[in-house]
Image: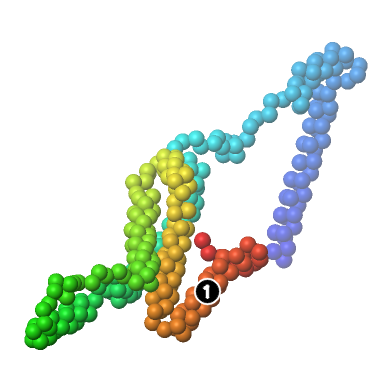
Amino acid sequence: MADLSLFAAELRRACDTLENLVKTTASAEPEAADNVPSAEDPDATASHIIEADSIPPHDNAPVEDGPKWLNPEPDKSDNAEIWRTYVEEADKHDAALMKRWNEGIDVFLLFTGLFSAILSAFLVLAWPALQPDSSQATSDALAAISQQLLLLSSGLSMNASAAYQTPSFTPPRWALAVNCLWFTSLFVSLLTAVLAMLVKEWLSAYNDGVALVPLERAKQRQMRYDGLIKWNVPSIVSLLPLAIHLAVFLFLLGLVVFAWPVNNGLFALMTLLLFTGLGLYTSSAWLPTVYPSCPYRSP
């Protein structure tokens, strides 16, 4: 019962508070209505109209710009984001390009070294053919001396024409052709290897002494890249394999000529293999021009 009495008292107090609030609101509304100008009071209406006319229209109100972080000014400094982005992307492109060229040149130098060693071994065999055979000259001299001794022992007179004379030597044509082809091949191979080492030094200097400021680095990179294109460095890199291909072809051609005086069957076999390889090489360079999807692409 005590709880019900307390609840009833609180409810009565809340009702009284709500009633007082309603009375206060009702008494404030007539005062607000008295402040509104009526049609019977022209001065008050005019004053309100003037005050309304003094308010600038909405369309002519100045539009404030948003916060500065919504419309940032472009960064025109040397460390601007655009230059940093350019340098990063250019470095990625240049790194991939230099890696591809350097790897190709490394393989090229390895092959050139092996090829030059093999070619030098064959030159050791072909070089003596350009010189007179010393053993044969010794045999001829001994035969002439024996003949002279025989004439002296028989009591016959020996005239000056019977004296031994060293025969003149003319190298065979095949030996001359083989040595010309193989020496030319060795010269082209070594010269191309030297050029390849020079190209590696050029590529190494491409990234030396780079600037630290992004704008200066961008200008420096573009100048160096334009220099690569202007001075045909990509073309030189592409021509290096063609030069060693020429050296290999000269070596194979000399090998065919070298087999000519040895045996006709061996000469025919070497000729057939040479023309077969030459046909395959020519086809691999010609097919991509006719069939764009052909993967047989070479420099």
Query: Which residue is nearer to you in this view: 236 or 9?
Result: 236
Q: How is the image coloured?
A: rainbow
State which quadrant residue 258 falls in: bottom left
| Residue 149, above or below 278 | below
Describe residue 51's horizontal placement relative to residue 79 as left or right: right
- Quarter of the rendering occupied by the N terminus: bottom right
Between 136 and 274, the one lying in front of the other is: 136
Query: Is 9 above or below relative to 173?
Result: above
All told, the count of numbered labels is: 1
For residue 225, side relative to residue 200 (left or right)? right
Q: Which x, y percent locates residue 7?
A: 72, 59
Amino acid at circle 1: Phe
- Viewer-closest of 24 and 54: 54
* Residue drawn 88% across the image and 15% down it: 41
- Front residue (pair 250, 162): 162
Q: Where is residue 187 in the image (x, y as percent from the top left)?
A: 34, 62
Residue at the image position 79 percent from the left and 32 percent from the top = 28
Residue 4 image offset from top left, x and y in percent: 73, 63
Query: Which residue appears at 76% of the width and 41% of the height?
Result: 21
Q: Is residue 66 visible?
A: yes
Residue matched to label 1: 275
Residue 40 locus on image (x, y percent): 91, 16
